[in-house]
Image (cartoon, grey):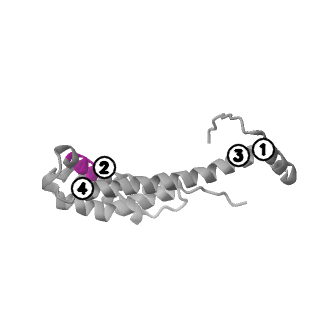
Amino acid sequence: MSTTLMSFRPDSHLASRLERLTILTGRSKTYYLKEALRVSLDAFEKEAFEQAKSRKEMKMNKMDNYEEASMTQRLAWFETAQEVCGLMGVIRRDWIRSEKRKEFPDQDKIRQWKEEAFNYEIEREDLRFDDIQEQERIFREYSPQVKAEFRKAQEPVYAAA
């Protein structure tokens, strides 16, 4: 994993608290700063996700009446549905790569996931701009799966000690 050098100037109270903690525990300042940043970023990201979700829900409610939606809104809806189908294929290809790395890959799973990835691509290509029912089905069925996979990808991986 590559690293990036960052620097900041904490106030003297924070600096002395950090110094005291490192002396008490024997851990480095870098360890505590990385951990504090990771925990804080998790909280900040969760908050930002909730705000974005709220904004998206407000926007989606405006799309309830498709006939009154602007051309830009309709196009955004259509392109997002296409993107969701594409992401379902990407997820399957990631699963295939992970399975192939195993000592004994399950060839049946690989075949199934290849077929699913292909079907998502066909679905994406066949999607029509004016087929709002199909776009809604894609959002309803696939979006939760895409979100779950991306959340899993964001979870920290801890190596067994």
List the residue tagged with mark 3. Answer: 33
Q: Choose the circle earlier in sequence order: 2 or 3.
A: 3
Q: Choose the circle earlier in sequence order: 1 or 3.
A: 1
Q: Which residues are magenta?
A: 75-82
Label 4, label 1: how far apart the Cα atoms are? 49 Å
Give the camera-side residue of 26 and 160: 26
In the rendered view of the protein, which quadrant contains the N terminus? Answer: top right
Label 2, label 4: how far apart the Cα atoms are? 20 Å
Q: Nearer the viewer, mark 1 or mark 3?
A: 1
Q: Position of residue 156 (x, y in %)?
A: 59, 55
Three-letter code for the amino acid on which mark 4 is drawn: Lys
Q: Residue at x 21, y 43 (%)?
A: 72
Q: Nearer the viewer, mark 4 or mark 3?
A: 4
Q: Choose the circle earlier in sequence order: 4 or 3.
A: 3
> Do callouts 1 and 3 mark residues in contact (Cβ within 8 Å)?
no
List the residue tagged with mark 4. Answer: 62
Q: Nearer the viewer, mark 4 or mark 1?
A: 1
Q: Position of residue 25 (x, y in %)?
A: 84, 54
Q: Residue furthest right?
A: 23
Horizontal arrangement in the rendering, residue 73 relative to residue 109 (left or right): left
List the residue tagged with mark 1. Answer: 13
Q: Choose the circle earlier in sequence order: 4 or 1.
A: 1
The kind of secondary structure element at disc 4 is: helix
Which circle marks residue 83 in the picture?
2
Q: Position of residue 17 (x, y in %)?
A: 80, 48
Horizontal arrangement in the rendering, residue 39 relative to residue 45 (left or right): right
The kind of secondary structure element at disc 2 is: helix
Three-letter code for the amino acid on which mark 2 is drawn: Glu
Three-letter code for the amino acid on which mark 3 is drawn: Leu
Q: Choose the circle earlier in sequence order: 1 or 2.
A: 1
Q: Choose the circle earlier in sequence order: 2 or 4.
A: 4
Say whether residue 117 is visible: no
